[in-house]
Amino acid sequence: MIGYISGTVVHSDSTKSIILTAQGVGYEICTATPMVPNKDVALFISHIIRETSQDLYGFETADAKKFFEMLIDVNGIGPKSAFALISHLGIQQIISAITFENVDVLKSAPGVGKKSAEQIVLSLKDKVNKLDMGFSVQEKPVKAGAKVNKAAAVDAHLVKETLAACQGLGFKDQDVLPMIQKHLQAGAATRPEELVKMILMELR
């Protein structure tokens, strides 16, 4: 199994890139965005082997590869759908959507329907809160002196109230969630009304 490739980009488009290694072998890899030709790159690889084909999916970090492989373990989610989710939404927004059971955000990705989105939430909700990948959610305040994950811990109730307020104003969750994450991790707000005000300033 191929797990990591480094080399020079010789061709790239919106879906795939060809990486030429120092050994003279060119690997065709599914990539989320076009890569710069003649640039040296290194990618973590998820090597998917099927009866009639083999595909390589490339990721900049080991965490992204790990999350992709979690997604394809979900019943009904294939590599193409999982990669479309990560490419379209980004890992942190997927984690946020799963945590708050926001099916609409997940099904906004190409090829992901309502049933698939619901299955992702059902299968991964308990797992994502245990991940150490930059955005965790806590249901209760952290006690004084307690150790906190290096990711910013987010009050789930605060996020839910902010999302509800923004929905009432006509904004989509997939547009609002990244802003909520950013402001909370920066420690810029502690109340829903503060978050909503900040988001409105960015969106209008």
Image: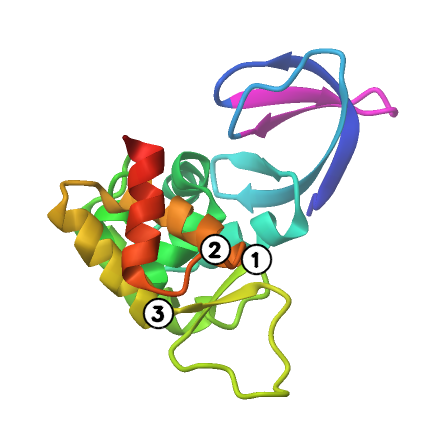
Q: Helix, strand, or loop for circle 3?
A: helix
Amino acid type of the residue tagged 1 in the rendering? Gly
Name the residue located 50 percent from the left edge and 50 percent from the top edge.
Answer: 68
The colour scheme of the drawn protein is: rainbow
| Label 1 to label 2: alpha-carbon separation | 17 Å
Name the residue located 61 percent from the left edge and 39 percent from the top edge.
Answer: 59
Amino acid type of the residue tagged 2 in the rendering? Ala
Provide the residue designation for mark 3.
156
Disc marking residue 134: 1
Magenta-tinted stretch: 16-31
Amino acid type of the residue tagged 3 in the rendering? Ala
Front in this rendered view, residue 41 or 56: 41
| Label 3 to label 1: alpha-carbon separation | 15 Å
**Position of residue 117 measured from the top left corner of the image (x, y, whole percent):** 26, 53
Provide the residue designation for mark 2.
188
Q: Relative to residue 46, is residue 162 drawn left or right? A: left
Q: Is residue 142 magenta?
A: no
Which label's residue is closer to the chain start, 3 or 1? 1
Front in this rendered view, residue 13 or 203: 203
